[in-house]
Each structure stands twice: as C-alpha cells, then as structure tokens.
Image (spheres, coloured by chain):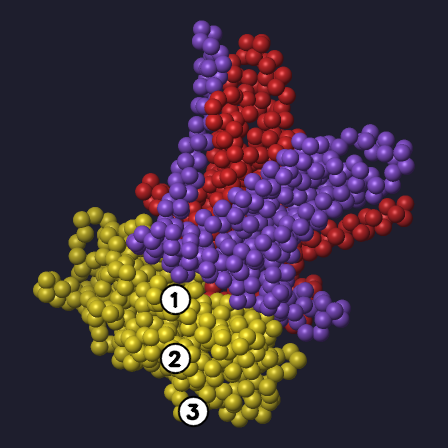
C-alpha cells in the first residue's frame, strides 16, 4: 500500500514538473475514462482557462476525457444532493466553500484527499492553508484551488481626496466618518449586504470577528450571544444610512456592481473588483485601492473572510484514480496560472511557488495593482470562515447548513431592518443555530 | 365619437403600462454597458448597440440552450397532448368502473407541489439511466403538464356533441375510426389551445431544470441564462435583457398568430368544469 | 385499430377500448406522480439527510414539530396572503381587461398580443425585468416616481416589509392575469348578442347589463379559473424564489420556499416532505370545500 502510494506520488510529481510530456501516463486505464468536473465559477474567461486545462490533460492522458459542467452558487446544494443520493456523482468538484466540503465529508460522501495534496506538494502551500480542510478524523477532505479575500475594503482615492480623508480607515469609527464624508446625493457610503442571503451571513460573521466576537466557541458550542456580536449589530445598524436603499436585498453581484459603477464610495468584495472596474468603469479604475476591512479597534487583528474555494472528489466516483490525477494536474503551473489570470485578484494562488512565478506576475492587472494583489494574497492565506473561525477552532461541519439556512442573515434583518430587540433576536438566533447543529 | 376616443386612450394606456416591462427590456438590451449604470437612467438610449446580441450568439451557449428549450418544449407538448387526448376521450366517452374517481384523481395530482416530487423523481430517472438528459426533463414536466392538459381536454371533449360520433358509428365506422375522422377535427381548437398552454409551462419551468440538469448539452434557457449571466461576481444586466428579448420574441411571434385559437379554444369547452 | 367484432357485446368491447385508451395516462400517472407522492409521505416519517437519503424512522414526530414551529405558521400566513392577494388582482384585472379587449378597440389584435405577453415570457425573464425595473440605483421606476415628485428617496421595493410582499403580489398579478383574460375573453365571445339587445330595450344601462347578463354568464368560467389559479398560486415557487428568496426575514417565504429550504439548505428531507404533505392536505381541504360550495350553488339555481 505504502509502496503503491509512493509510486503514484512520484508519478504525479513528475507530471507536475511537466517532464516528458505524454510519456508518463499515471496509470493505464482499461478503457476511456470520462470524468465530470463541476464548478460554480464559470465566467467566459474562466471557462476558456478550464478548456485549456482539460485539453492539456487530455494530451497527457489520451484515455481520460474530462467534461466541465457548470453549477451555481444557488444550485449546487440541490444538485449535489440529487447526485449524491442517486450515486451519479461528478468525479471532481471545484470552487465550493470549504465548509460545504466538510459537511459532505462528515457524511462519508467525499474521498480523503491526502495523497493528492502530497502529490501537489504539501510544502508548497501557504503555511496552514490546508488546516481548513482537515476533517475530524485527521485526514484532509479536499484542498483549496485558490484563496479569496472576500471582505476587502475597497476605496476610491479620488473621492477620499475630495472629502479630505487622508488615510484609509482602519477602525469602524474611521470608516463611518469616511462614509459620512463621502456620501453625496449621487453616491452612497458603502454597499454592505442586508439581504436574506448567504453573503449577509458570511460578511456579517466577519463583522462579529471584527469586534472580537465569534459564533461558535473553539470546541463548537453555539455562542453567538456575545459582546462582539452586539457591537457588530450596533455598527451595522449605524451603517444602514450610508448604504443604498436596495442594500436590503444585496448579494455579491449587487454589492460589487454598486462599487464598480460608482454608486458607492467604498466596496466590500474580492479582487474581482479590479477586472470589473477596468472593463466597466475605466474612469475610476486608476483611483481604486484596497485594505483589510476595518475593525472595532486596531487591537483586534483583521479577520479576512476566505471561503477557501476547494477541490474535492466524491467518494462515489467510479474513477477516483483518474480524478485524483486530474485534481493534481489542475495545479500544473501553465494551466493553473491561466485559471488564476481569468479573474486576476479574485482567485488567488494557494501555492507559494505560483505566487512567486514570474509567469503569474506577468499580467496587466496584477502588475498594475501589485500591492493590492500581494496584500490580498497574504490576507487570504491567513483567512477564516464560519467553518474555521480561528486557528483554535475545530473544523465545523455544520457551518454550511448554518450559512445556507441563514439564521445569521435573519439576525441582521431583524435587528437592523425591523428594529427588533437585540436580546430577543440573539436568543432566537442562538436557538436556531443550536437546532441546526443538533440536526 | 369623443367617448370612443377617450375609451381608446384609456384602454391603450393600460395596455402600454402592462407592456412597459417589454419596452424597457428592449431598451436596456440595446444600451451600451456604460450607459446602463447612468444615474438617472436614460429613457431612450443615447447610443444604440447590438453588441450584446452578438456576444450572446457568438461567445456563449445561448443557441445550445435555445435549441434544448425548443426540443424540450416540443417533446413535452407532443407527449403530453397525445396521452391526454386519448385519456380525455376515454374519460368522456366510455363507461367503465372507476372512471369518476379517476377524473377526481387527476385534479388531485394537480395539487402536488413540484418541490416534493424532485428527489423521488430524480432517483427514478437515475435508475432508468436518464439523468441529466433532455428526456429526463420531458418526463419531469409531464408531472405538472399532464394533469392540466387532461383536465382541459376533458372539458373540450365534453363540449363535442355525441350525436356526431353516433352518426359516424351508425354509418359503420369503427370506434377509433370515428375518433380519427369526427372527434379529432372537432377537437382541434382544443388541442391547439392545450398544446399552447403546455408549451408555455414547459418553456418557462425553472425548478426542475435547476436540480435535474447539470450539463450544458441538456440545459434549457431558463437555468442556462441564469447560470451564465447571474453569478456572485456579476449580474450582466445588458446581456440578460438581450437574452430575455431573444427568449421572448419567438414566443410572441408564434402566439400573435395563434392567439385567436387560444381564446376560441377556451370558449368552446374549457368553461365546463 | 381493430374493427369491432359484432359477435361480442359491443358495450364490453367499448369498455375495454376505453381502458386501453386511458392506460398510458394511468401508467404515466403512477410512474411520475403517484410513486413520488407515496415516497413523499413515506419520507415524511423519517429524519433524513438529503444528500445520502440515510436516516432513522421517527414516526409522526416531524408533524408534531412542524405544528409547533412559528416559521410554519408564518409561512402559511404568507402563502395565504400571497395567494389571495395576487389571485384577487388577477381576477379583477383579468375580467376588466377582457371586457376592454372585447370592445372595438383600435389595433385590437395588437393590444391583445401585448396584454398576453406577460403570460408567455418565462418567469425567469419576468423576474429579471422586474428586478431591473425595481432597482434602487439604476431602476426606471424609482427614477420616474422621483421625477414626478411621488417620492424623494428611492423606494426599496423588494428588501423591506411590507413592500416586498406587495411587489411580489403585483408582479404575480402582472404575470398571470393574462390567463384570466384568455379564459374570460373566450367566454365573452360566446354570450349571445340578443341577450344584450333585449336588456337594452328594457332600458338597462351598461353597468346594469354587466351585472345582469355578463357576470352570470361568466360565473361558470370564473369558478373554474379561480380554482385553477388558486392551486397554481398556492404552489408558486419560481417567481417568489427568484424575486425575493423569501426575504426580507421570512416575510415573503411561502410554503413551497420553506419546503425547498428544509430540503436543500438544511438537508432535512424528512421534515421537508412533512411540510409538503401538510401543504397538500391544506390545498385538498380548500379544494373540496370550494368544489362542494360552488356545486351546491349550481344545483340550487
């Protein structure tokens, strides 16, 4: 067993190094193998990069055919549920948030990923990058195909200048003051999400941590009723007047568009802002910059929300060996860099060697915004999410359900939009989360 | 005469208000991207562009989705209408035990919410080896289209005088011969009308398509367009509106011609519960 | 296509043929409707994790828990508000528009096509267009209302209560009232003209003619339309899900959305099935009561 794993690893590594193209099939398959690859990330540029990776892989392994099938952020849960329950699963899935993977793994639906990580080269990952994928049994349930720094504070220097703001806000007080100063008749302060959707849950979790709070204790007791949450709710309520009226329904797309179109002076999003601004609103593109999102005070460390876009292989896949080969191949520099360049700054490399690779750096947007991209890469590598609230936290396999069912977004809506009593709302939220956790 | 003019103005202002979203859809689809996010919005586009249409046709899978939707809707309509026509004929013109309760059951199945049917249906489709295909959606759409079609056709059928058929039978025609020669021509408006309703239902369905279909080769327009253009990093409003126009125009053209069938058919028999 | 053999009793042969003709319908019904229905009832007795469909038998516990949940009652109330609200508007608008379109209008068939348009377009398209119209920043509705002086701050159509429910009801009415127009218009065309002539001679004005002749003639068709539309509206998922997703909070979350959330966000297939079964039971009760009521009236007339 040990031996066979070693050879596979060696083979994969040789493959990674790009040596002897086509001469080293990882394994000879009895007949042509078809792999189905699912991802919710499928902008036209990304699809082109995937197509390149699929072709390159097929050139190496003529007996393996990969078909890309797009799912969506709203659709993946029911689609995977249907797939898992029927046994007709995709062979490889990418770009789902890490907590979804943990939940599936805990139910025995996912293949351990340790050997693929080893094949890619465990040392090449940013330190701790795979901690979020470590499951309760000590194995890895997947790995990151990229990092994302999803709650960066985006600013426009031109508006800051007009409003006489000389530094990028680091605390909530400074942010509020800045938004008040920059808000004019045509421009709002910030596009914070207040919608009943996953973005609100995810982003607000960041605000809770920005005030030193948490949703779960490190050993995963529900503990959302704490001072941090209260401070975050208070701040979020104060920010309402600086957000567009429709922010009550905002999710990622609306929030991003609001900043890029110039409707808001600040933004909260990933590096996708860069490419969208360059394409859709070149007038502001040269003025934008980003920083980690402000906190209650500078004593609290920034908490970057990274949903850790993942790669994993369903346990019911009939072609796990081929899927693993392909999973490892996704990190082959040539194709991987193309994939990252499809949305520069949006999906950030998980491998240090790629981040330092001149080919990766050789991109108009990454060059033009090198400081921002580097900052995001660092912030994301040290990022967290509800499934992994801090380095002390155990991995939380119920985080996916908590996010999808939305008690945290409900909390925001009750307190901020409805003006409900904070104590009552918090105790209901605690109960709702506890109920989800107990299943 | 003034009354007539006033009435016309009044009526047309309502019609135009109802159709305003259509107008706005077209306007948005021909605005260039930079004009889209202008505040306040421009009512008539300052620059007219058809680039969004070109991009949809050339750079995306729009045409594949379109083809899938057409195949899917036509197949569903043909299947459902043929089964329902036979079923309705049987329910109305034949006497056998359980006929009445069967008719009631039809109405009952009409109550089933799609959400519940999805998982069991999906498991069944997988067992049949049909998952992720257009055929699987045809089968799924039958669940809500068949009860409705059967119900509609049953009332159309009841509106056809029995004498006609009897006369044909007396003349020596077989039962099925009479059905073919006498009933079907009479039923034609009803069939066309039912077919139109079925077509609309399957053309518009979203939930089943969302859960059951995962590959672009089988994905219909509804989920295809949503998937392609509404994502967490972008809502391509201009492309969405262009897609909406292209999704709607063929239907509008077809229905503009068949519109009279729709209303005539319903009048002939659809009113009899 | 066999010719009837006169040697056997014709009636029995006909009954056989009748059964053969209905057979495909019954087969399809059993396969795609009855089987899933029973599995739904069966699943509702278990606690089941959706992706694996593994779970444990819990008997009627799901039902017990469901009735204790305020979320169920709120969603039920929302469903009723939505159904009644949108249905009423559909009927009123639909009948009114049918009457207008029945008149001699300029470019009548163009007007008819334009009115029917909302019913033809996909729900997805309808929702997208409306979301774009409703948009707080770039939406034309807010812009028009501000420039007319109706409001001085953009209205939040979909994200605040009760705006969201009102918007959903309005969009629902817009989308489905053409169905009523189709049916009513069809019926109007079959009302014999002499009825009106006679009433005119008796000195009845247009309003009296509407209540004395048109409405009674439309009764039958309205009974049917209301039943059909009520069922569809009660079950409506796509429109509300895509427009508001049930928000803000759960103020527009109807029962089908609750079922979806339970099944696919919380992965509780058993609980979801229980909700669905209860939902069907409610519809069934309404339907039976409605059918009986309207039938009694018909018989007493």
Q: Residue at x 58, y 80 (%)?
A: A242
Q: Tag on residue A435?
A: 1
Q: Residue at x 86, y 46 (%)?
A: B4
Q: Is residue C290 visible?
A: yes
Report crowding for label 1: few under 14, some 14 to 19, many 20 or more residues within 10 A (C-alpha).
few
Precedes in sequence: disc 1 or disc 3: 3
Report crowding for label 3: few under 14, some 14 to 19, many 20 or more residues within 10 A (C-alpha).
few
| Viewer-side label of 2, 3 | 2
Q: Which lettered chain is shown in red?
A: B
Whole-percent x, y for residue A58 in the image? 27, 56
Separation of disc 2 and disc 3 at Cα? Answer: 17 Å
Q: Is A379 situated above or below B210?
A: below
Compared across the picture, whether C100 is left or right of A330 comes to right
Could you tell me which chain the residue with mark 3 belongs to?
Answer: A
Q: Tag on residue A214?
A: 2
Whole-percent x, y for residue A319 in the image? 23, 54
Q: Residue at x 47, y 89 (%)?
A: A171
Report crowding for label 2: few under 14, some 14 to 19, many 20 or more residues within 10 A (C-alpha).
many
Q: Residue at x 41, y 61 (%)?
A: C265
Give the labeled residue for mark 3.
A298
């Amino acid at each position: 067993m040990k031996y066979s794993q070693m050879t596979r690893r060696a083979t994969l590594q040789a493959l990674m190094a790009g040596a002897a193209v086509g001469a080293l099939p990882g394994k000879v398959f009895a007949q042509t193998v078809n792999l189905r690859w699912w991802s919710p990330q499928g902008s036209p540029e990304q699809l082109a990069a995937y197509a390149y990776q699929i072709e390159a892989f097929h050139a190496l392994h003529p007996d393996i055919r990969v078909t890309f099938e797009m799912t969506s952020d709203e659709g993946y849960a029911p689609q995977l549920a249907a797939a898992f329950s029927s046994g007709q699963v995709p062979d490889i899935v990418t770009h789902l948030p890490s907590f979804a993977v943990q939940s599936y793994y805990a139910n025995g639906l996912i293949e351990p990923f340790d050997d693929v990580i080893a094949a890619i080269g465990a040392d090449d990952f940013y330190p701790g990058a795979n901690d979020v994928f470590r499951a309760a049994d000590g194995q890895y349930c997947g790995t990151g195909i990229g990092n994302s720094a999803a709650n960066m504070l985006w600013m426009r220097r031109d508006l800051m200048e007009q409003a006489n703001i000389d530094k990028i806000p680091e605390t909530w007080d400074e942010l509020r003051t800045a938004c008040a100063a920059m808000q004019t008749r045509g421009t709002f302060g910030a596009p914070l999400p207040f919608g009943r959707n996953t973005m609100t849950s995810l982003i607000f979790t960041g605000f809770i941590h920005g005030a030193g709070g948490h949703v779960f204790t490190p050993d995963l007791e529900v503990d959302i009723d704490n001072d941090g949450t209260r401070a975050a709710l208070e701040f979020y309520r104060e920010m309402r007047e600086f957000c567009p009226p429709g922010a009550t329904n905002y999710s990622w797309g609306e929030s991003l568009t609001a900043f890029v179109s110039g409707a808001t002076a600040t933004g909260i999003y990933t590096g996708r802002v860069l490419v969208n601004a360059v394409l859709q609103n070149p007038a502001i593109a040269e003025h934008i910059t980003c920083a980690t999102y402000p906190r209650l005070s500078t004593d609290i460390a920034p908490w970057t929300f990274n949903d850790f876009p993942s790669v994993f292989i369903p346990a019911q896949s009939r072609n796990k060996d081929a899927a693993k080969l392909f999973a490892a191949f996704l990190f082959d520099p040539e194709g991987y860099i193309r994939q990252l360049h499809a949305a520069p700054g949006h999906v950030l490399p998980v491998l240090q060697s790629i981040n330092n690779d001149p080919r990766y750096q050789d991109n108009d947007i990454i060059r033009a915004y090198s400081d921002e991209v580097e900052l995001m890469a660092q912030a994301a590598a040290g990022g967290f999410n509800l499934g992994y609230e801090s380095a002390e936290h155990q991995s939380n396999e119920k985080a996916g359900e908590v996010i999808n069912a939305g008690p945290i977004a409900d909390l925001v809506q009750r307190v901020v939009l409805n003006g409900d009593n904070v104590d009552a709302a918090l105790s209901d939220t605690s109960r709702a989360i506890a109920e989800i956790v107990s299943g | 005469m003034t009354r007539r003019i006033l009435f016309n103005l009044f009526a047309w202002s309502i019609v135009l208000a109802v159709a305003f979203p259509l107008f706005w859809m077209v306007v948005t689809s021909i605005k260039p991207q930079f004009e889209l996010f202008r505040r306040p919005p421009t009512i008539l586009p300052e620059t007219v562009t058809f680039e969004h249409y070109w991009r949809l046709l050339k750079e995306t899978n729009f045409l594949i989705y379109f083809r899938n939707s057409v195949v899917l809707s036509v197949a569903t309509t043909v299947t459902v209408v043929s089964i329902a026509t036979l079923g309705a004929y049987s329910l109305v013109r034949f006497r056998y035990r359980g006929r009445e309760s069967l008719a009631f059951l039809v109405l009952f199945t009409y109550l089933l919410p799609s959400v519940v049917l999805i998982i069991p249906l999906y498991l069944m489709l997988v067992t049949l080896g049909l998952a992720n295909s257009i055929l699987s959606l045809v089968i799924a759409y039958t669940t809500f289209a068949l009860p409705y079609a059967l119900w509609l056709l049953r009332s159309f059928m009841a509106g056809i005088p029995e004498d006609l058929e009897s006369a044909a039978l007396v003349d020596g025609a077989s039962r099925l011969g009479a059905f073919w020669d006498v009933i079907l021509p009479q039923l034609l408006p009803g069939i066309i009308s039912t077919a139109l309703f079925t077509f609309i239902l399957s053309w518009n369905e979203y939930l089943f398509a969302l859960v059951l279909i995962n590959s672009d080769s089988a994905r219909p327009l509804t989920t295809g367009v949503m998937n392609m253009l509404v994502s967490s990093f972008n809502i391509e409003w201009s492309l969405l509106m262009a897609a909406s126009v292209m999704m709607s125009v063929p239907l509008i053209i077809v229905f503009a011609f068949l519109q009279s069938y729709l209303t005539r058919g319903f009048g002939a028999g659809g009113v009899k519960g | 296509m066999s010719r009837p053999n006169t040697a056997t009793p014709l009636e029995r042969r006909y009954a056989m043929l009748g059964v053969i003709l209905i057979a495909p319908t019954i087969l399809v019904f059993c396969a795609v409707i009855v089987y899933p229905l029973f599995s739904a009832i069966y699943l509702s007795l278990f606690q089941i994790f959706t992706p694996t469909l593994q779970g444990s038998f819990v008997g009627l516990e799901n039902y017990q828990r469901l009735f204790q949940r305020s979320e169920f009652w709120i969603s039920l109330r929302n469903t009723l508000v939505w159904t009644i609200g949108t249905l009423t508007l559909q009927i009123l608008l639909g009948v009114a528009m049918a009457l207008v379109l029945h008149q001699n209008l300029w470019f009548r068939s163009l007007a008819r096509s334009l009115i029917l348009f909302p019913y033809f377009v996909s729900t997805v398209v309808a929702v997208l267009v409306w979301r774009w119209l409703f948009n707080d920043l770039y939406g034309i509705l807010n812009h028009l209302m501000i420039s007319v002086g109706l409001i001085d701050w953009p209205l939040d159509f979909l994200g605040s209560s009760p705006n969201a429910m009102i918007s959903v009801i309005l969009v629902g009415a817009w989308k489905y009232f053409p169905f009523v127009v189709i049916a009513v218009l069809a019926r109007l065309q079959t009302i014999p003209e002499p009825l009106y002539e006679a009433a005119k001679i008796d000195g009845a004005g247009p309003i009296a003619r509407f209540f004395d002749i048109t409405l009674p003639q439309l009764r039958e068709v309205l009974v049917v339309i209301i039943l059909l539309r009520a069922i569809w509206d009660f079950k409506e998922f796509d429109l509300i899900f895509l427009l508001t997703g049930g928000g803000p909070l759960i103020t527009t979350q109807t029962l089908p959305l609750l079922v979806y959330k339970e099944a696919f966000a919380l992965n509780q297939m058993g609980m979801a099935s229980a909700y669905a079964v209860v939902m069907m039971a409610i519809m069934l009760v309404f339907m039976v009561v409605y059918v009986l009521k309207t039938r009694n009236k018909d018989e007493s007339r």
